[in-house]
Image (spheres, rainbow, N blue to C red):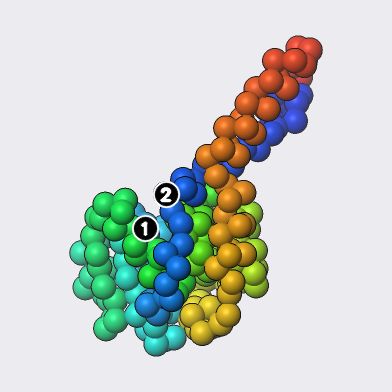
Amino acid sequence: IRRYYNRAAGVVHPPVDTTFFHPSGRPSDGYALIVSALVPYKRVDLAMRACARAGVPLRVVGIGPDAARLREAAPPGVEFLGALSDEQVRTAYQGAAAVLLPGTEDFGIAPVEGQACGRPVVALRQGGACETVVDGVTGVLVPESTDTAFADAVHSVVHGAFDPDVIRRHALRFSRDRFQSELLAEVCELMASPTEQVAS
């Protein structure tokens, strides 16, 4: 943006409905959770292998063209829930011991929804997860996309002590109210500033 338009770029993170997604107040049911389209770049297969290695059951919410292959490759302990209603997805987050993001996303809505429900996240240390997950506080950022690294992280989160209230407060940084106010501020600043010359 600076190079071609001669101006700084403001970043307004996408909103998450942190009113709808909220903690249940109940302990987790001990499973790991993925909420995702079932396509190869989401790396659901990595999560399946890692959870099997860690001895943690995995529930997968979502549909997509990779579903048949994943079901065929799934080890014991993996449950495919298919497409769920918003309320059912919220219940799945609330019961999870960890929400997984094994792929790389520009932002990644599911980890923030999970955190809004007070649940820690295990995510690859790339892309948007570096901005939405606080390593060691709201989850664990995994340095490499290997079965062993993810399995170790899943085990540490599922058997660790993470504060749901702290996780929830962090997720509120991505609320709809915050999105609206930040977007309005960006628009107002743009409208109030003098026209900048575009670099030739």
Locate residue 51, reporting x and y percent.
Answer: 40, 80
Who's the residue at 63% across and 54% down the image?
Answer: 131
Q: Residue 151 location in percent, x, y? A: 48, 81
Who's the residue at 37% across and 77% down the image? 29
Circle 2 SS class? loop
Q: Which residue is mark 1?
A: 90
How many marks can you see? 2
Residue neighbourhood size for the residue with mark 2, other residues' Cα within 10 Å, grouped as few (<14), some (14–19), many (≥20): few
Quarter residue 96 falls in: bottom left
Residue contact between numbered discs 2 and 1, judged by CB atoms under 8 Å: yes
Residue visible at 77% across and 16% down in the picture: 193
Whether residue 179 is situated above or below residue 32 in the rendered picture: above
Category of crowding for the residue at label 1, using alpha-carbon neighbours closer than 10 angstroms: few (below 14), some (14–19), many (at least 20): many
Between 111 and 64, the one nearer to me in the picture: 111
| Residue 108 shown left or right of residue 49 in the figure | right
> Gap between marks 2 and 1, in whole Å?
8 Å
